[in-house]
Amino acid sequence: MRTEGISSQYSVVYEPKPQHYDFANQLVASQDFFERSTRVLDEADSGFRPREGMMTVAQQVAHTAQTLDWFIEGAFRPEGYDLDFAKHAQAIEAVTSLAAARQMLKAAYANAIQVLRSCSPEDLARPLPAGPIMGGQPISDIVWAMVEHTAHHRGALTVYSRELGKVPPMPYGG
């Protein structure tokens, strides 16, 4: 409670409204950083991979999209996360277009942001399903995991860019 004196006889008492943290803003920033860092890559770079056995440019972006969806789905379904990583990898191997992968990423970010913004603080404080992936932690903790995972692949793609002779811009500037 806070009081502000109007005069020596009167004072106004008010209770500040509780501020609810908008976790989705972290994903908005993450999306901006990802797009800025990777904008030097174009469709002709889709199939580039530094070494055999590594993901291509398009697959890196598609995997990032897939993982955003995976975190959201796993956090809100009773059985938790789908741990069939071979199936997930197989789906990514089929992605050959950077433009298509960018569309997947745009849709995944939009979905994750919408889901987070539709949740109450109580929803986000609920524990994640039991299991090896953050089991029992608050649902809101998936946000830092999504941001960290996305940053990891954003960084890998900046290395890919340099291997292609391109200079990626700093992610945090205009």
Image: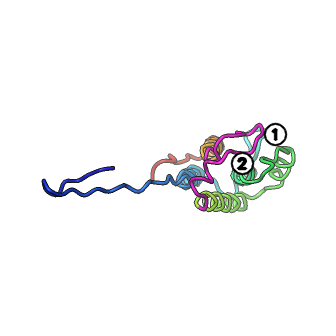
- Residue 93 x/y as whole percent: 83, 50
Q: Which residues are magenta?
A: 118-141
Label 2, label 1: how far apart the Cα atoms are: 12 Å
On whether residue 132 falls in the magenta region, the answer is yes
Badge 2 vs badge 1, beta-carbon distance below 8 Å: no
The quarter of the image holding the C terminus is bottom left
- Based on the displayed image, in which of its 4 quarters is residue 5 positioned? bottom left
Circle 1: is it few (<14), some (14-19), or many (20+) Cα within 10 Å? Answer: few
Q: Residue at x 73, y 62 (%)?
A: 100
Q: Residue at x 86, y 44 (%)?
A: 86
Amino acid bearing label 2: Gln
Is residue 106 among the parts visible in the rendering? yes
User: Residue at 86% across / 48% down in the picture?
Assistant: 87
Relative height, residue 107 to residue 125 (above, below): below
Closest to the observer, 117 or 156: 117
Neighbor class of circle 2 (other Cα within 10 Å; few <14, some 14-19, many 20+) is: many
Residue under label 2: 60
Q: Specify the label residue 53 is tagged with.
A: 1
Please tell me whether mark 2 or mark 1 is closer to you in this view.
2
Residue 112 vs residue 6, the one in the foreground:
6
Quarter holding residue 9 = bottom left
